[in-house]
Amino acid sequence: MILADGGVIWATADTLRAQQVTGVVMTVPQKINDYITSLRPQAVCNKCIARGTGLSNDGAHPAQVTGALATTSDFRQEIGTCSVCKQTKKVIRALA
C-alpha cells in the first residue's frame, strides 16, 4: 500500500485484521527487526526474512533493512548458516 506522502506500508490480511483491533500499523523495517529479534540468537538470511515476514520481494527489501540494522550494536551481519534454510550465506542475528 502506498500512502499519499509516498511512504509504503506492508500489510497482509492478518496484519490488517490486527490493525483493526489494535490500531497499530507496523512498517516493513519494524516487521523485519521484530522477526530477526524473535529468532535471537539464531541467524537468518534475507530470503528467509522475506518469506518469514510475508514480503513479496524475495530478499531485496530485507537486504536494505538488514544492511542498516547491521550498522547498529544490536545486530551482527556475517557469513554463516541460516537457521531457517540451513544454507551458508550472509546472515544477520540479533545480539543479546
Image (cartoon, grey):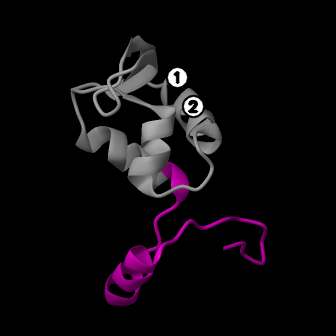
Considering depth in this image, is 52 or 27 the residue closer to the camera?
52
Quote the CA–CA distance across marks 2 and 1: 6 Å
Of residue 56 and residue 74, the one placed in the foreground of this image is 56
* Image coordinates for residue 36, horizontal then vertical, percent: 35, 39
The N terminus lies in which quarter of the figure? bottom right
Q: Are marks 2 and 1 in contact (CB under 8 Å)?
A: yes
Q: Residue at x 63, y 49 (%)?
A: 57
Task: From the top left corner, tell me how far across and down residue 22 is, in percent.
Answer: 33, 83
Q: At which x and y percent is residue 2?
A: 72, 72
Front residue (pair 91, 72)? 91
Residue at the location (35% across, 49% down)?
34
Q: Amino acid at mark 1?
A: Thr
42 lies above or below 20: above
Give the side of residue 78 with respect to residue 2, left or right: left
Q: Is residue 10 visible?
A: yes
Image coordinates for residue 80, horizontal then vertical, percent = 37, 12
Magenta-drawn segment: 1-29
Residue at coordinates 23% horizontally, 33% vertically from top-left? 40
Q: Would residue 23 be seen by someone viewing this image from the given angle?
A: no
Question: Quick check: 64 above or below 15?
Answer: above
Any magenta on residue 88?
A: no
In this rendered view, identify the residue nearer to me: 48 or 25.
48
The disc at residue 71 is 1
- State the image quarter where residue 95 is shown: top left
The image's mark for residue 68 is: 2
**Apparent side of residue 79 relative to residue 35 in the rendered image (left or right):** right
Mark 1: give few (<14), some (14-19) or many (20+) Cα within 10 Å: few
58 left or right, relative to 87: right
